[in-house]
Image (cartoon, rainbow, N blue to C red):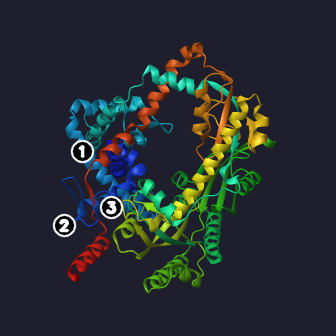
Amino acid sequence: MAHSEFLKFLRKRMKVIFWLTALVFIALVVFGWGAGLTARGSGKTKIDENIAGKVGKHDISYIDYQKAIQSEYEQAYNESRVVGESEAEMIRDRTWYSLVNRYLSQEEFKSKGVDWATDREVFESLRRDPPPAVTQNPNLQSGGQFDRALFEEFLRNPQVDWFSVEVMIRNNLPYNKLQEIVNALPVTTNLEAQIEFIFSNEKARASYIKFDPFALVEIAVDTSDAAIEVFYEENNENYRTELSVIVNHASIPIIPTPTDTQDVLGIAETLIVKLSEGEDFDYLAENYSKDPASRNRGGELGWFGKGQMISEFEEAAFAADSGEIVGPVLTVFGYHIIKVLDKMGEGDSTRVRAAHILLAIEPGIDTEESAKDLALALVNDVEDGDDFFEAAQKLGIDSVGQSAPLGEDDPIPGIGFYGRIRAMLFNSKVGSVDMAVTLIRERPILEAVTVVQSWKRIEAGIPQLIDVRDQIVTDMIMNGRQDAALDLCRKAKQLLSTGVDMSTAADNVGGIYDTTGAFARYDWVTGIGEDPIFKGTTFGLREPGRVSAPFLGEDGTAYIVRLEEIVPASPELYSQQAIQIKTEIANFHRQTAYERWFKNLRDNADIIDNRFQEYTQIEVEEEEGEGETE
């Protein structure tokens, strides 16, 4: 076996594998909370325009930022994947978040004393848990599977150069050590396990009377200006807000046209001709198929039975003979050229082994440009002073809307978490408008061009009465209805105290009477749902026959509840399950430890995103101009 081939494979894979494995620790938190990073630091903070951003005192240079982006593009290239505009936007954000997380991690490495690794640690890590660059090496596989004995033989051979693997492992070990430290932090106590067991196994059964505040009629609520002002003064703290924006948004899906479909069909028919002339199916699959899971193995799908594939595909594959090539077959994923490799069994037990070439029906350049031109026309009209919705209607764009107030960590309708659009909404002047290509669906791929306008910005703090007047009126009416519903509950309870049964009491005061089946605290309760207030109140009664005080459920419905039966959790069963329960709780804590720990790290870090200076400069220049005017 040639060592040169072994090394050639390792070095070829190292570009991709190193980047992936070096960020395994970081990737656990990048997607969960990455979008919030741009919110740290003021958009008006002036730093060197040649710096992409800062993490504490550490500068993130544009050179490092571009190198990280390039690595993602190299990965896509090595996977024979074309990067579209929507993914390009996500790559720019994802690499930024990764760099921020990397610098945060490196500071933690130093503070925890895990920023280095001995040669022995590197060797033991390689021997114990070889990375994918090693396990996927065909020179270390037997029958398509990683051969540990063969790996150990190579490991003992002094002529094999492991330098590239060593560098990768040495860089990853600090993450692994930090992972062990974070995993050791959560402790599962006996009390925690007992509570979890009781919540899962203790059962209750109840009867109740409920009143829907919205169903009540003739509820008089004073909504005069004086009453509104009093309510505002007494409750204005409840209306305190963080910085938020209201946005107008319109989406134009980039949908393949009949011409696009016909073009793909033409390619499929050309490939059928090539195959009939003797072209290699594996070669064509590798170079033409859009199925990333099978493309690099000649389109091989393995064995499958009836009901496992989409109906059109299954019908064609099962109707063909072994060795036959059929197609093009149209499904929601595109056109398939199917090669039946083998068949076994009869009737419903028939199984087929097949390969395919998938030609996805994607929008052509003209289709994409048409959607972008339409979006750009909307942007231009709005920038010229036209109303957003009137301009969209004039252009025939019907997928439009206006958002509720959005905080800095909320997804933008039609956009998601794009940092560029977020910077425009929160840092540029109100009325600003921009557009972006977004991914609506991954398979089959569907993109859209979304236009977003900053319609209104709500500054942090307690808003003026005029800004929340409508909400206050709504709240006053709702409070009045809930108070009336609670009064009816009190009347029903008073009737119960005189010996009237619950059903009769409900009829007398106009409430709804019902009963529950047996339920635990984590169960869905028919007629109630997941309401934790209802379930907590029921279990809190403890003694059958006791009736609760009137209370409001989570959705504002008024209740009184009588506990009919409570079945305690079995101590014997707990003794049998205690270890398993503790293990499950500990595993859950470990799975969420990174996210919680890193979130705390991020929340206390001083992070500045300087990538979108064109938006922050607008705001700064505006303020400077206002100062000069004064």
Mark 1 and mark 2 residues within 8 Å of each other at the beta carbon: no
Q: Residues within 10 Å of mark 2 (few under 14, many from 20)?
A: few
Residue type, mark 1 in image: Gln
Q: Are marks 3 and 1 in contact (CB under 8 Å)?
A: no
Check the image and report above or below for 591 versus 613. above
Q: Which amino acid, mark 3?
A: Gln
Is label 3 in contact with label 2 (beta carbons under 8 Å)?
no
Q: Which mark is residue 70?
A: 3
User: Residue 285: which quarter of the image?
Assistant: bottom right
Query: Label 3, label 2: how many angstroms apart (C-alpha)?
Result: 23 Å
Q: Nearer the viewer, residue 207 or 31?
A: 207
Q: Going from the N terminus, do you reach mark 3 or mark 2 first?
A: 2
Q: Position of residue 303 (x, y in %)?
A: 65, 44
Q: Closer to the observer: label 3 or label 2?
A: 2
Q: Earlier in the sequence, mark 1 or mark 2?
A: 2
Q: Earlier in the sequence, mark 3 or mark 1?
A: 3
Residue 90's place in the image compared with 531, above or below, is below
- Looking at the image, is 34 positioned above or below residue 131? below
Q: Mark 3 and mark 1: span between their CA atoms?
A: 22 Å
Give the side of residue 91 with respect to residue 110, left or right: right
Q: Name the amino acid type tagged 2.
A: Asp
Residue 445: in sight, yes or no? yes
| Nearest to the observer: residue 570 or residue 318 | 570
Identify the residue shown where x is 27% and y is 44%. 105
Secondary structure beneath dot 2 equals: loop
Residue beneath label 1, please? 106
Residue at which label 2 appears: 48
Residue 411, visible in the rendered structure: no
Report whether 408 appears left or right of 568.
Answer: left
Callout 1: 10 Å neighbours few (<14), some, many (20+)? some
